[in-house]
Image (cartoon, rainbow, N blue to C red):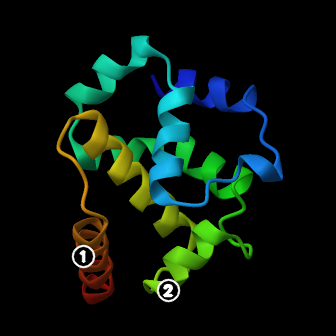
Amino acid sequence: MWIFLSLLLLTHPQTENDIPKTVQEAVSSISEMIPNTELAVIRRTSEDEFVSNAKFTLGVWMQEAWELWDDHELTNFFNEHGFFAPQEMAEIILMCYWRQLTQKGFDIEEVFEVKREEIRQMRNSN
């Protein structure tokens, strides 16, 4: 699946008008890109496994295509909630996508708290 995603992303051009303004728009954009044949595979993975694998393909693509380092509405939204690293933003979007796909639903504040806890744990282990 991960090789497929890499190839798919190379062929999915983006323009500045395609940059999502909200997390929900980002999740919807991802949903439109991933073919139905891959959905069952993604649903069978855990959230951690999906995010851990997809951050190197889909996550990097989002950072580049959506310019998560630049002054855009989506980036500013993350900045207002204390997330400044493009990789963290991409991982949060991936978490939200997985939760929506698996019908867990996502409360963005809950996802933010999970991500903040992951960051705290990483800092404490160093």
Is there a contact, CB below 8 Å, between mark 1 and mark 2?
Answer: no
Q: Nearer the viewer, residue 61 or 109?
A: 109
Q: Earlier in the sequence, mark 1 or mark 2?
A: 2
Quadrant in the picture for the C terminus: bottom left
Q: Residue at x 61, y 72 (%)?
A: 75
Name which quarter of the figure residue 64 lies in.
bottom right
Name which quarter of the figure residue 122 lies in.
bottom left
Is 107 on the left or on the right of 81, as rendered? left
Quadrant in the picture for the N terminus: top left
Q: Position of residue 98 (x, y in %)?
A: 31, 42
Q: Position of residue 80 (x, y in %)?
A: 50, 86
Q: Residue at x 55, y 42 (%)?
A: 58
Could one spot residue 56 in this view of the protein?
no
Name which quarter of the figure residue 101 lies in.
top left
- Counting every numbered tag in the picture gives 2
The residue type indicated by label 2 comes to Glu
User: In the figure, 33 relative to 61: above or below?
Assistant: above
The residue type indicated by label 1 comes to Glu
Q: Residue at x 25, y 28 (%)?
A: 43
SS of the residue at dot 1? helix
SS of the residue at dot 2? helix
Is 84 on the left or on the right of 49, as rendered? right
Q: Position of residue 109 (x, y in %)?
A: 27, 72
Q: Residue at x 82, y 46 (%)?
A: 15
Instruction: Give the residue furthest to the right.
Output: 15
> Which label was assigned to residue 80?
2
Instruction: Give the residue furthest to the top.
Output: 37
Q: Which residue is mark 1?
A: 113
User: In the figure, 58 relative to 116: above or below?
Assistant: above
Characterize the local packing of mark 1: few (<14), some (14-19) or many (20 or more) Cα atoms within 10 angstroms.
few
